[in-house]
Amino acid sequence: MTNVRRPDTRPANPRFSSGPCAKRPGWNLDVLSDACLGRSHRAKAGKAKLAAVIELSHAILEVPADYRIGIVPASDTGAVELALWSLLGARGIDVLAWESFGKGWVTDITKQLKCADVRVLEADYGQLPDLGQVDPARDTVFTWNGTTSGVCVPNGDWIATDREGLTICDATSAAFAMDLPWDKLDVTTYSWQKVLGGEAQHGMLILSPRAVERLESYTPPWPLPKLFRLTKGGKLQEGIFRGETINTPSMLAVEDQLDALAWAKLAGGLPGLMARSRANLAALEAWVDKTAWVDFLAADPASRSCTSVCLTIVDPWFLGLDAATRAAVAKRVAAALETEGAAYDVAGYRDAPPGLRIWAGATVETSDLQALLPWLDWAWETVKAENATAA
């Protein structure tokens, strides 16, 4: 039997999934009542809403005026792959990988595009590669925040201002929560369903003037599907960056994103959103500091994510188990939390070391995280006692 008493109070919103993430506080279906349904997305009303998403995103993210933002298909994955297929091959490539999504871009570049001159800079879960090895003469592909490891780059200081190559940054769990240095980023991607809690299937593509120059001056050696074509006759298709999407978007999802952006503005814009995420991480850090059985997977606080917070179990009993049993125990902890209605979808990513992953982005209330913390202790002690008894 466990000595930890079942807590009396549950989080008001137990949704701590790392994607799709929690909706903004106070969200309900009524916010979709003005959606442009049953109309062409190319009609004046539909285009106006798509353009508004771009304009609001531009303003809240504080993106430079000469950078372009477009809505593209297939979420962040589609946005990243559109960039890889359209821009790579002109120079050598450094691709950084320290968790599953970065490793996915390695696969795209080396096995699908089969680029000839590729350096893969890797690190284990919980660590970062040596950023000092990045060559500014080469194109660089990286994730700003490793959603499945809870490890982010601490800043953009390692990116040369006078670089010759382009930087292609997957920022899907960083945008709207972390300070992105736009002068260091040539291509930036993210999806609606992360920090703002929007709906899936739509990606955002942000291009610097240098990226546009590459698009207009370089033709890759491989075929480009229609969904990846940003140029026509050697010129950028500017309509894409005014809301004339390549394919048909969901106008329900568009309406939801407009609501999320309106909330973000009311929450204080980018500074307010960043402060909310940092406050959530601080609550988790205070608990981890006094809790013996758990630690952060991100070993260095400077590279610790304030959105996808990954926890590893360090209890000596747990570490003495074989790998399969450790994985099973961690899953049972997450399952116990879900059964109690205390936290949904907090199991660690399947390829990551066994543990928990708790979303702490801006749409999550700090009070809900604080209410969750006693439940984490209860779930761990309960599962540990059950396994010890069974053994």
Image (tube, helix red, strand yellow):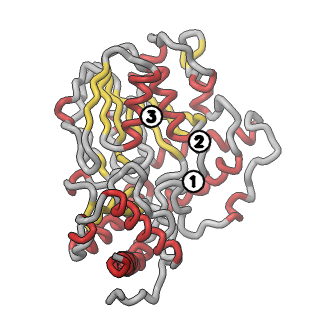
Question: Does the residue at mark 2 contact the one at mark 1 (Cβ under 8 Å)?
Answer: yes
Nearer to us of marks 2 and 3 is 2
Q: Residue at x 32, y 33 (%)?
A: 183
Q: Quadrant of residue 41?
A: top right
Disc 1 marks a residue whose amino acid type is Gly
- Front-most of 120 and 85? 120
| Residue for point 69% across, 64% down | 29
Give the mark, 1 or 3, whose residue is nearer the N terminus.
Answer: 3
- Residue at 27%, 61% (x, y): give it: 296
Q: Which numbered dot is residue 65? A: 3
Q: Where residue 2 appears, x then y in whole percent?
A: 34, 86
Query: Marks 3 and 1: in contact by CB < 8 Å?
Result: no
Q: Amino acid at mark 2?
A: His
Is 230 in front, or is 149?
149
Q: How many angstroms separate mark 2 from mark 1 (CA)?
A: 9 Å
Secondary structure at numbered mark 1: loop
- The numbered mark at residue 202 is 2
Quick one: SS at disc 3?
loop
Instruction: Tell me: 163 left or right of 106.
Output: left
The answer to whether residue 360 of the structure is visible from this angle is no
